[in-house]
Structures are given as C-alpha cells and as structure tokens.
C-alpha cells in the first residue's frame, strides 16, 4: 500500500507539472499585459515619467521579463525575480488580482468557505435522500412506487439547473415569501455571532433546496442501479436461502457490494464541490468560488484563474487517488498495491 501511494504521488506530481505548464502557457497567450497597464496608470498620474522605463520596471517587478519557461518557474517559486527573491506558489504567493487590487489569497478566502458551506450541506442532504430512496426503489423494482420515483428522477435529471432555480425562486420566494430571492445577509441588519450565522443559513436555504433537488435524479438512479446489480448476485441468493431476514441481507450483504461503484461517484462528487455550484452562486448572488471564477474569466483576471485552475487539477488528482484507495477499503478483493 505504501509503495503504491508513493508511486501514485510521483505520477500526480508529473501530471500536475505538465498540466500547470499548459494552462500557464494558454493564459499567457491572452492579450493581457499587466506591466503595460501599470505603466500607463503611472504615466496618467505623472506625465513626466517615461513609458519604456516604467514598463521595464513593472516587467521586472511582476516577473514578466525573460522567457515563458522562466516566467513559469517564477510563478511556481523555483526561479528568482530580478531582485533575486523567490515569491511563487511554493512560497504561498498566488499572485495579485488586477480587478480587486489585492492578493489572490485574500480574494478567495471568504468565497472558499462559502462554497464549502453551501456544497457540503447540499451534498449531505442529497446523499441522505438518494441513498435510502435508491435502496427502496431497488427492493421494490417494478412496483408503482418505483415507477413513480423513476419518472420523477427523469424529470429532475432533465431539467437544467437555472430552470430549477427560477422555479424555486418563483415558488418559495415570490409565491410563499419563505426565503429571500438572493444575497447572503439581510439588508440593513448588522448581525454578529450566532445570529449572523442563522441569518446566513436563512439566505442559503433556497440555494440548498435547489442544489439538493438537482442532485436527486442522477444520484437516485445510480444508487438504484448499483443495488439492483448487487441484489442479483449469487451470494445474495445464498443468504436468502439460509433464511436471513431481508433487512439483514440488504444491509450487510447487498449494500456492501453496491458501495463499490457508488464510492467513486460520491467521492468524485464531493471533491467537485468547488466547480459544481457556479450557476447556483451566480443566480442567488452568493460570493463563492464559482462566482469569483466566472468574474475572473470575464475580467481577464488571470492570476485568480491560474490559481483556481491549479487547485482544481490538484483536487482531481487527489480525488482519483482517494477513489482507488476507497475501492480497496470497500472491497477486500481489491488490492490497490498490485
């Protein structure tokens, strides 16, 4: 197991370097020159400055001088700037945002926790509904209740997220006035402490309902299919032939086998929370990672985009490793080290 993990970590490092270099090259091909923008701002404030001198100054200050590969190494923190300092990803510097005029870490700090908060509870609620519902439908396969659930999941799975969000706003915010339309806090209210937390929960309630509903269709059908396959195994027939109660057969035998395909879906879903709520965050005005990412792309704020893309790559690589390790834990027949 230890050798397998070390080998995978080595592969992950190679893939991370290759992909990070590719995205760095792509975003450096865009017609955005921060050194020129900074030089023009200085000249606009002081007409006596010389553009060529200020442009060269800002190129060196921002690490934009030299070849593309040298700039990439500076971005990683493996090559020095003009003054001999190292200030890249390895030193904890993700760059500075052009739009917000502050470090990227300061820009994404609050959205990072908002996205975790929103998606963690959305995933928790969805799993709490889909797993029991999928198991129930598998046990009652072909019944009227199973058919009704299948029809409902197809409808929910087929509806785009923004349509569900609009319907949710119309129903819960406009018709019944239960939740606010958008935002993260009550306007004109300066709540602190636990009261501020409750107010945040109140504003996050409708987005959570929409996210949970959008996740029910696909997840329920996936759990149902996995349980149907597990219930048709020979070991399940043997357990039933021994006279075991159906509840024990499902809980102790079928569910363990059904977990094998489900675990990959669940882990991948949970690790995709940072990019899976872009639409929800923009519709409901939530200051999350999805909204920041969308705004950064629109404004050509490449430092934020590069940092978030690199984070998504790391998240995907770690997720694949966790899926493989989870397979070994769920199914003793699988030996990830072989």
Image (tube, helix red, strand yellow):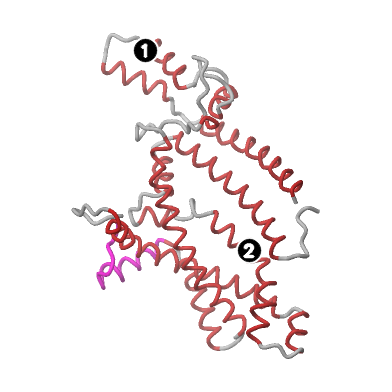
Residue 250 pos. (x, y %)? 65, 80
Q: Residues within 10 Å of mark 2 (few under 14, many from 20)?
A: some
In the picture, the disc for residue 51 is 1
Counting residues from the N terminus, which is met first, the one under dot 2 or under dot 1? 1
Residue range corresponding to the magenta coloring: 162-182
For numbered disc 1, what is the local secondary structure?
helix
The residue depicted at 49 percent of the width and 14 percent of the height is 83
How many numbered marks are there?
Answer: 2
Residue 100 position by quadrant: top left
Q: Nearer the viewer, mark 2 or mark 1?
A: 2
Q: Measuring 67% from the left and 59% from the top, which residue is drawn there?
A: 326
In this rendering, would 153 be left or right of 249?
left
Q: Position of residue 193 (x, y in %)?
A: 29, 54
Q: In this view, does 227 lie above or below 194?
A: below
Q: How far apart are marks 2 and 1 (CA)?
A: 58 Å
Mark 2 near mark 1, Cβ–Cβ under 8 Å? no
Q: Which mark is residue 263?
A: 2
Q: At which x and y percent is residue 78?
A: 59, 25
SS type, badge 2: helix
Q: In this view, does 224 lie above or below 209?
A: below
Magenta span has 168? yes
Which residue is rendered at x = 58% and y = 44% of the image? 313
| Location of residue 45 in the rendering, given as x and y in whole percent from the top left corner | 26, 17
Please tell me whether the stretch drawn in magenta is mainly helix, strand or loop: helix
Q: Which of 180 and 246 is in front in this view?
A: 246
In the image, residue 30 above or below residue 131 = above
């Amino acid at each position: 197991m230890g050798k397998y993990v070390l080998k995978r970590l080595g592969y992950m490092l190679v893939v991370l370097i290759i992909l990070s270099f590719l995205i760095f090259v792509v975003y450096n091909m865009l017609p955005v020159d921060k050194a020129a923008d900074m030089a023009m701002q200085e000249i606009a404030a002081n007409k006596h400055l010389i553009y060529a001198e200020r442009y060269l100054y800002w190129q060196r200050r921002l690490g934009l001088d030299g070849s593309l590969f040298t700039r990439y190494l500076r971005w990683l923190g493996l090559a020095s700037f003009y003054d001999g300092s190292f200030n890249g990803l390895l030193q904890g510097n993700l760059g500075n945002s052009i739009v917000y005029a502050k470090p990227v870490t300061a820009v994404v700090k609050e959205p990072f926790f908002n996205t975790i908060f929103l998606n963690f509870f959305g995933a928790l609620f969805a799993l709490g509904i889909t797993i029991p519902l999928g198991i129930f439908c598998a046990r009652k396969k072909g019944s009227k209740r199973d058919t009704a659930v299948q029809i409902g999941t197809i409808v929910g799975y087929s509806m785009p997220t923004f349509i569900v969000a609009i319907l949710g706003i119309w129903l819960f915010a406009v018709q019944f006035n239960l939740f606010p339309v958008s935002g993260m806090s009550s306007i004109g209210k300066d709540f602190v402490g636990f009261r501020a937390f409750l107010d945040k929960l109140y504003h996050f309630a409708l987005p959570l309902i929409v996210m949970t509903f959008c996740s029910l269709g696909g997840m329920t059908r996936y759990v149902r299919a996995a349980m149907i396959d597990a219930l048709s195994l020979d070991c399940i027939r043997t357990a039933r032939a021994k006279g075991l109660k159906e509840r024990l057969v499902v809980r102790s035998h079928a569910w363990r086998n059904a977990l094998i395909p489900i675990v990959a879906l669940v882990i991948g879903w949970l690790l995709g929370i940072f990019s899976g709520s872009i639409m929800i965050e923009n519709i409901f005005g939530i200051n999350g990672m999805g909204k920041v990412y969308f705004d950064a792309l629109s404004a050509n704020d490449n430092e934020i985009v590069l940092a978030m893309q690199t984070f998504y790559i790391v998240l995907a690589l770690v997720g694949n490793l966790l899926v493989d390790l989870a397979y070994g834990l769920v199914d003793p027949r699988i030996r990830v080290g072989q």
